[in-house]
Amino acid sequence: MIHRGIATFGLDEGRCPKWLFERMVKLGREMTMVLVEEYGPDEFVRRIADPVWFQSLGTVLAFDWNASGLTTILTAALKESIRGMERDLGIFICGGKGKTSRKTPEEIGRWGERLSLPEAKTKNLIYNSRMSAKVDSALVQDGFQIYHHSFFFSNPPSGGGAWAVVQQGMNAAKASARRYHWFSEKVNDLVCEPHSGISSSVRVPRMLDLTSKKSVSSREISTELVGSGYAPLIKDIKLLRKYFSQLSQTATLGTSAGQLTLLNLETIEFKSHPVVSEDFAASKYLEKILTKVTDEKPESYEKLVAIEGVGPKTVRALALVGEVIYGAEPSYEDPARYSFAHGGKDATPYPVDRTTYDETIAVLKRAVDRTKLESVEKRRATERLQRML
């Protein structure tokens, strides 16, 4: 079972020592071979999409369990550990940190050619990679900038196949990181609660989450707005600019003579509402994108988001028009649900999910025991795993 939640980890600086990375690659190779042999490549990919499993595997491979570097180093170590063995294992890892993340579509494409995958399948994998990155940067507006994107997929000889995404964003001001997990079998809709888990060091008290089920009316009105054509939409945009101009002067609604009143909200609510600090001045780039999307008239919100050039500013503008003018309020709740790090044996503030951890530790311990490592290394790996609790 895959759980969503928050696992506390801060933003690391510096580089992973060469000796540590080499050890992680060595152990990662052994662990991957054992896990694939026992569970198969599809199941390995599924487990990568589980935040608890991913965190635990990183700990086994000798990285600090609560460090943001676990994400980037673990994926890099796994990618290096199976290099040259991908076909035999049926597992393929693309992307990585920084500039490498932007090469993910090219890597998937190259694997598609080498494996002689149907063109449609390769394109679908590339599309899912790009959309997961776009959703977490544009629709989940939590203040974390995506800087790492890894795409895992399986292609077992017996058929089938699955994919998973592990990507991470940073918030330099909060010195924290947030990791987003996706798994193909859990994604029924790429723009509606597609995550298998979100791990973060902090909860965001007020953020725009357009992937929430509570944002369905906002997504629908956004699609309708671009379908109505440029003239009606830009008219609403100009009305919204006037609205923001008045907000910046009074921070209240309907209290001054001749003031534009669109929402009947208390002043106390607007002290924390995202629209108060919104910079919605005239933007040639925004108007250019709106011209493009209204010309294309996408049939769905997913197709709207998929259009090149549509980013956080565009979807936020449409969401605010929908909320302020048409009353379609999106969700401003953090999609993360609970914290692994702050649970306690006294159930304060909530119980530790011991069942999930116990099952994960048992499987990984069994895998460690089956590796061909020296007994000392096996013991150290097991000890690191046990210290997680």
Image: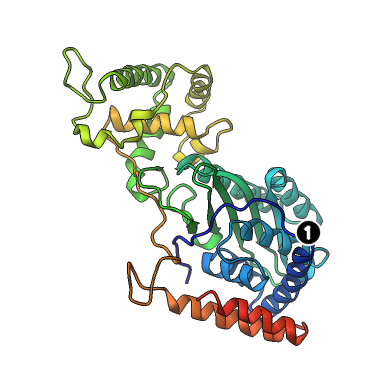
Give the residue drawn at x 63%, y 81%.
Answer: 382
> Vertically, is 322 above or below 99?
above
Residue 243 is situated, as x and y percent measured from the top left of the image, at: 30, 20
Q: Is residue 355 left or right of residue 63?
A: left
Q: Residue furthest top?
A: 258
Q: Is residue 86 visible?
A: no
The amino acid beneath tag 1 is Leu
Callout 1 secondary element: loop
Residue 17 is situated, as x and y percent measured from the top left of the image, at: 75, 60
Q: How many other residues sit within 10 Å of disc 1, few (<14), some (14-19) or many (≥20)?
A: few
Residue, disc 1 = 115
> Vertically, is 54 above or below 247?
below
Residue 385: quarter of image: bottom right
Q: Is residue 288 left or right of residue 280?
A: right
Residue 330 is situated, as x and y percent measured from the top left of the image, at: 34, 41
Give the residue drawn at x 55%, y 34%.
Answer: 307
Residue situated in front as seen by the camera: 4 or 127: 4
Residue situated in front as seen by the camera: 126 or 146: 146
Colour scheme of the rendered structure: rainbow
Q: Is residue 341 left or right of residue 72?
A: left
> Vertically, is 145 above or below 348?
above
Q: Is residue 186 left or right of residue 74?
A: left
Q: Is residue 144 visible?
A: yes
